[in-house]
Image: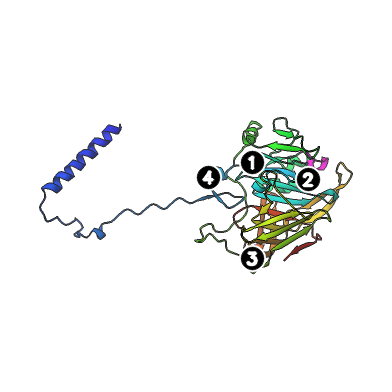
Amino acid sequence: MRIKKIIPTALLILCMVFAVGCGSETDTPAASGSSDPAAVVTEPEPEPPAGFYYPLTGLEAPSLEATQKRPISVKIENSSDSRPQLGLNRADVVYETRVEGGETRCNALWQSDVPDDVGNVRSARLSDHWIVPQYSALFFNAGGNNEYDAGIPLYINYNMSYHFPEVPYYRTSNRVAPHNLYLDLSEIYDVAEDLGYPSSTDNVKGLYFGDHTTADGAVPASGSAKAAASITITYANYSEAHWDWDAAKKVYLRTQGGKVHTDAETGDQVFSTNVVLLFADYSLRGALDPAGNPTWDIDMGGTGKVIVCKDGKQYEGKWQADRNTPPIFIGADGQQIPLNPGNTWIEVPAQDTPVTVE
């Protein structure tokens, strides 16, 4: 077939050369009546295809398929015995919420950059009944109390807890239980498919990053802003989260309990492009943890106060969310506050939690 296409083209070129060589010195004007080369109509250059962007980071993705991978949600311990954790700096979004005993615990979501291993994995909490369905994520955890378990059929579509023998959890020897549970994510999408859980979806729900086509790559602001070079959330006296703006790196750097918080994978300090303070209502429930402490329920639906920190500045407004949609952040001008492309930590303090932003 290739030869049949080439021969007519070659004959046409030979005929054109012959015609040019045998013609007079004066060229015949074009049929349009003009011999001006500038008047020749050319086909317009095709426009480049629109870019693809990861829904949880706003960063450019290599393909549509890459943006459709279902997010991976893992419950990560954050006690002093668990730090440094593995893989936090590669998470797209991290939620930090208070748990019993004054500690905090994280729900970390990976989609754009999935590590081979993450941890330390711990048990789920009632707040995960909000976070996991908001992102329609695969959820990995070390189980939960009876009240959490009762909500799984209602809220958690893709539960892949420690109790599933197919899921590659493992324990390490360099820590003592229960702080030594980790998860191998290297082939986790295949494992999900084997369990009947779709590993991709054409409706991945993400956060709002504004207009990606801005000429200089900047993200428009929403309303006026005050300084946010230092952020402190005092969940408890020994569980204080602190962020400092690094203007050179254009990220916030994290300390926990007065110590630099690092990622065990690289040893680098934990960082975030955006830090969101999502104030929520906490209430004590009857279910107890193994130590006998009452557990918290956190209402992360409806609306409430929010402070979005980016570029060393803070933007106050309100958050809105329901059970099936990640939160959006509305500024004082009524417009959505866009996040900067990159990773985001969403701190979830109670209404009366001491918070300082300056």
Q: Residue at x 27, y 32 (%)?
A: 3
Q: Amino acid at mark 3?
A: Gly
On residue 115, which mark appears? 1
Q: Earlier in the sequence, mark 3 or mark 2?
A: 2
Q: Can you tell which quarter of the image residue 311 is in?
A: bottom right
User: Residue 355: within the magenta?
Assistant: no
Graded by Cα atoms within 10 Å as few (under 14), some (14 to 19) or many (20 or more), the crowding at tag 2 reads many
Give the alpha-carbon distance from disc 1 to disc 4, as whole Å: 20 Å
Amino acid, disc 1: Pro
Given contact means CB atoms under 8 Å apart, are the residues at marks 3 and 2 in contact? no
Which comes sooner in the sequence, label 4 or label 3? 4
- Whole-percent x, y for residue 298 in the image: 78, 52
Position of 172 relative to 248 (above/below): above
From the viewer's perspective, is the residue at label 4 or at label 3 nearer?
Answer: 4
Q: Is label 1 in a helix, a strand or a loop?
A: loop
How far apart are the alpha carbons under marks 4 and 3? 31 Å
Q: Earlier in the sequence, mark 2 or mark 1?
A: 1
Question: Based on the displayed image, in which of its 4 quarters is residue 308 positioned?
Answer: bottom right
Q: Badge 3 is on which residue?
A: 334
Measured Cα–Cα span from mark 3 to mark 2: 33 Å
Residue extent of the magenta highlight: 142-148
**Who is closer to the viewer here, 222 or 169?**
169
Residue at x-position 27% and y-position 36%:
5
> Which is more N-terminal, label 4 or label 1?
4
Q: Which mark is residue 64?
A: 4
Query: In the displayed structure, would residue 193 be above or below residue 47?
Result: above
